[in-house]
Image (cartoon, rainbow, N blue to C red):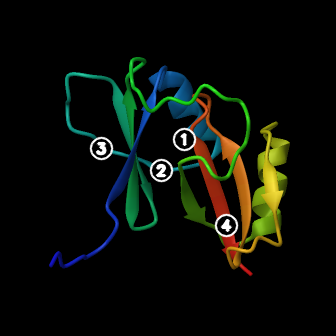
Amino acid sequence: MIQLEDFHHVSLSVTDIEKSKRFYGSVLGFPEIERPDFDFPGAWYQVGTAQLHLIQNSEAETLRTSDKLDSRDGHFAIRVKSYMETLEYLREQGLEVKAKPDSKSGFKQIFCMDPDKNLIEFNEEQ
């Protein structure tokens, strides 16, 4: 049996690393951390105890083509302290959001997309 310790990181494919760094670093405020000197562009961020790794790869088969905010699509989720503050902030940034304050999941959810249409969920305990 595998003995699990923790969730380490999520990797996302992006097409323009500078545009993605502005989104994750400046808009969302994720703290960027040191990344090894790979032979391809990317960026790493610390998000709580886990990390988000961005990899520039315009040929990736995981890139979404739909502009539709569909919570059933693959996504990663970030737990936030305040649902309302997060919702207001994302709207102030001009992001399209899908708010689900009464989700059957057991927690309040907000969905948005990054510049490459990767789906992101922010949630708070109900």
Disc sitting over residue 16 in the figure: none
Residue type at mark 4: give it: Asn
Front residue of 38 and 116:
116
**What's the distance in space between the residues labelled 2 and 3, CA to CA?**
10 Å
- Looking at the rendered structure, the secondary structure element under dot 2 is loop
From the viewer's perspective, tell me whether residue 22 is left or right of residue 95.
left
The local crowd at label 3, few if under 14, some if 14 to 19, many if 20 or more residues have their Cα within 10 Å, is few
Q: Say which quadrant the C terminus sits in.
A: bottom right
Q: Considering only vertical position in the picture, is 14 above or below 76? A: above
- Looking at the rendered structure, the secondary structure element under dot 3 is loop
Residue type at mark 2: give it: Pro
Q: Disc 1 or 4, which lies upstream in sequence?
A: 1
Q: Considering only vertical position in the picture, is 49 above or below 53? A: below
Q: Disc 3 or 4, which lies upstream in sequence?
A: 3
Q: Circle 3 is placed at which residue position? A: 34
**Residue 105 position within the rendered picture, expressed as x and y whole percent measured from the top left:** 68, 74
Disc sitting over residue 25 in the figure: 1
Residue 7 sits in quarter: bottom left
CB under 8 Å between discs 2 and 1? yes
Q: Circle 2 is placed at which residue position? A: 31
From the viewer's perspective, tell me whether residue 107 is left or right of residue 55.
right
Q: Circle 4 is placed at which residue position? A: 123
Q: Considering only vertical position in the picture, is 88 above or below 59? A: below
- Looking at the rendered structure, the secondary structure element under dot 1 is helix
Residue visible at 49% across and 20% down in the picture: 16
**What's the distance in space between the residues labelled 3 and 4, CA to CA?**
27 Å
CB under 8 Å between discs 1 and 4? no
